[in-house]
Image: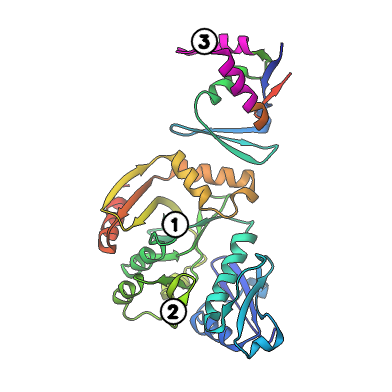
């Protein structure tokens, strides 16, 4: 089972603004402008490695998820891995 | 280079060399009250050169070169030599600036505080900056505003103000005693004329100011105003910056600091009188 964790905090600069959050990825020098649920995913993952189901359960604890879809979450996570904001374990 | 001059605009020193006398003579005239580069050493070099030796005389056409160049930039006719020099200086700033976060914006100052105005070409950045100068604001620049990542302060770049097309009569009427360059017709941006910033703008060019208000003007629409949230201001200003990417994390810090601290508004305006009233009111209620 693939597990995910957030990129090490030292590699990210996260600045929440009004509706959106800015994430500067030090390794690539790229600025990401993200909306929910990306900041929430990064915070829920932290440095702990979680499976998709484990992460979904944690998000469900913290937020009132209307459509808890593991497939959609897995797709989001793969996008974040591509961007370098999340790592596979 | 046969003809050479040097000058300082805000914190940046330039050395401009040319195969022809005319563009250098125009620069020396219009920039006659500007200081020389600090310590005599320029930050950037600009060269205006003939494509072939004989093109110095026959249908002379001016190529722009310098420390940083865009390949295949189209040459300009010699009558537009001053424009070529200005474009060359802008190009060095846009491509080579590393010390400051460079915003494609005009800036004016009042009481030590800076108003930034940015938008697409034709939005009225230069026109509004010139008209505000006529009303007693200190002009900091009509093209570039420099954000110091170390302090967050805005440094000015008060080059010659570049006025285009319908802005020309409006600004000439507002500043009847000002010094203007020659009228250049048929440039890539239409009819163009340079305006020399007033004595105060030149004397205070090295004084930074604290950013206080950001405006995104749009000309040609019914008068309207709306607040711009920091996230939208951030996106718009990254688009208005030529060196955001190359500054890396310093640029990120400078820009996030700016949009978090400084309120921003979009203003649509049908004419400059309306715009000036909008600016003064927003400045008063910030």
Number of the label disc, if any, that sits on residue B139? none
Q: Position of residue B160 (x, y in %)?
A: 47, 73
Q: Foreground: B261 or B128?
A: B128
Local crowd size for mark 2, using a 10 Å CA cut-off: few (<14), some (14–19), many (≥20): some
Question: Is the same chain shared between marks 3 and 2?
Answer: no
Image-based side of A25 in relation to B126, left or right: right
Nearer to me, B81 or B134: B81
State left or right for residue B83 relative to residue B18.
left
Chain to which the residue tagged by mark 3 belongs: A
The image quadrant of residue B35 is: bottom right
Residue B170 belongs to magenta span? no
Who's the residue at 44% across and 81% down the image? B181
**Mark number displayed over residue A60:** 3
Q: Position of residue A56 (x, y in %)?
A: 57, 12
Q: Is residue A20 left or right of residue B111?
A: right
Above or below for B285 versus B182: above
Q: Is residue B70 above or below residue B24?
A: above
In the rendered image, which residue does mark 2 sit on? B185
Q: Is residue A40 above or below residue B62?
A: above
- With respect to residue B266, does A17 lie above or below? above
Question: Dot 1, how many residues are within 10 Å of its Cα: few (below 14), some (14-19), or many (20+)?
Answer: some
Q: Is residue A59 magenta?
A: yes
Which residue is located at x 57 percent, y 72 percent?
B8
| Image quadrant occupied by the N terminus of chain A | top right
**Closer-to-camera residue (A74/B26):** A74
Report the span colored magenta. A52-79
């Amino acid at each position: 089972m693939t597990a995910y964790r957030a990129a090490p905090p030292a590699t990210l600069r996260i600045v929440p603004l009004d509706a959106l959050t800015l994430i500067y990825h030090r390794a690539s020098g790229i600025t990401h402008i993200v909306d929910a649920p990306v900041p929430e995913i990064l915070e829920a993952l932290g440095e702990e490695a979680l499976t998709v189901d484990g992460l979904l359960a944690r998000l469900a604890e913290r937020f009132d998820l209307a459509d808890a879809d593991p497939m959609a979450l897995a797709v989001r996570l793969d996008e974040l891995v591509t961007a370098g904001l999340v790592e596979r374990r | 280079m046969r003809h050479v001059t040097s000058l300082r605009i805000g914190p940046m020193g330039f050395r401009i060399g040319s195969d022809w006398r005319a563009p250098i003579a125009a620069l020396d005239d219009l920039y006659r009250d500007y200081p020389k580069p600090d310590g005599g050493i320029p930050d950037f070099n600009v060269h205006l050169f003939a494509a072939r030796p004989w093109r110095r005389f026959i249908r002379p056409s001016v190529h722009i070169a310098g420390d940083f160049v865009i390949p295949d930039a189209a040459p300009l006719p010699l009558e537009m030599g001053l424009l070529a020099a200005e474009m060359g200086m802008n190009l060095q700033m846009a491509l080579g600036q590393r010390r400051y976060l460079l915003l494609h914006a005009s800036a004016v100052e009042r009481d030590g505080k800076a108003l930034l105005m940015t938008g697409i070409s034709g939005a009225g950045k230069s026109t509004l900056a010139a008209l505000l100068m006529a009303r007693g604001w200190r002009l900091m620049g009509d093209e570039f505003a420099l954000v110091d990542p170390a302090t967050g302060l805005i440094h000015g770049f008060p080059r010659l103000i570049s006025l285009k097309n319908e802005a020309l009569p409006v600004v000439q009427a507002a500043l009847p005693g000002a010094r203007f360059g020659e009228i250049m017709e048929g440039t890539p941006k239409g009819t163009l004329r340079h305006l020399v910033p007033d004595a105060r703008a030149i004397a205070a060019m090295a004084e930074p100011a604290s950013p206080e208000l950001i405006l995104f003007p749009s000309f040609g629409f019914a008068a309207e105003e709306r607040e711009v949230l920091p996230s939208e201001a951030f996106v718009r200003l990254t688009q208005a910056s030529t060196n955001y990417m190359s500054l890396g994390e310093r640029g990120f810090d400078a820009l996030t600091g700016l949009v978090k601290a400084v309120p921003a508004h979009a203003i649509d305006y049908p004419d400059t009188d309306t715009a000036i009233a909008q600016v003064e009111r927003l400045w008063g209620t910030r």
